[in-house]
Amino acid sequence: MTATTLENELRAVPDPVRGEVMGAALRAIYPESGKSIERLIRRMENPDIPEDVWRGVEDAEDGRLVDMPS
């Protein structure tokens, strides 16, 4: 299968399912990178969310919390 063929096949998959298909394929190829793959897919599916919000969400997921002065 060529890269062009694969790209065309992925474009044919409906948007809501495309991330699942890509995530499953990447996890099968790179099983050690599950968290990074999930985050990448989530960011691609939600391009309207600013980078600083993603950093905050991911810091919280990883237990890196910052005390905010009150």
Image (cartoon, rainbow, N blue to C red):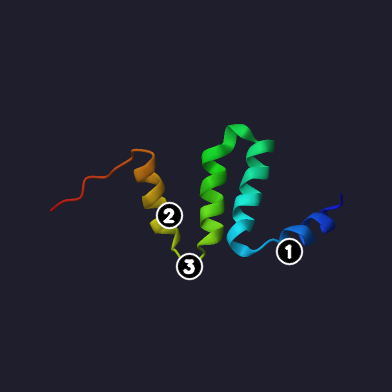
Closer mark to the observer between disc 1 and disc 3? 1
Q: Residue furthest bottom?
A: 48
Q: CA distance from mark 2 to mark 3?
A: 11 Å
Q: Residue furthest left?
A: 70
Residue 32: x percent and y percent? 59, 32
Q: Amino acid at mark 3?
A: Asp
Residue of label 3: 48
Rendered image: mark on residue 54: 2
Q: Residue at x 65, y 36 (%)?
A: 30
Q: Secondary structure at mark 3?
A: loop
Q: Secondary structure at mark 1?
A: helix
Residue 47 vs residue 8: left or right?
left
Q: Amino acid at mark 1?
A: Ala
Q: CA distance from mark 1 to mark 3?
A: 23 Å
Residue 35: x percent and y percent? 51, 40
Q: Is residue 43 above or below residue 61?
A: below
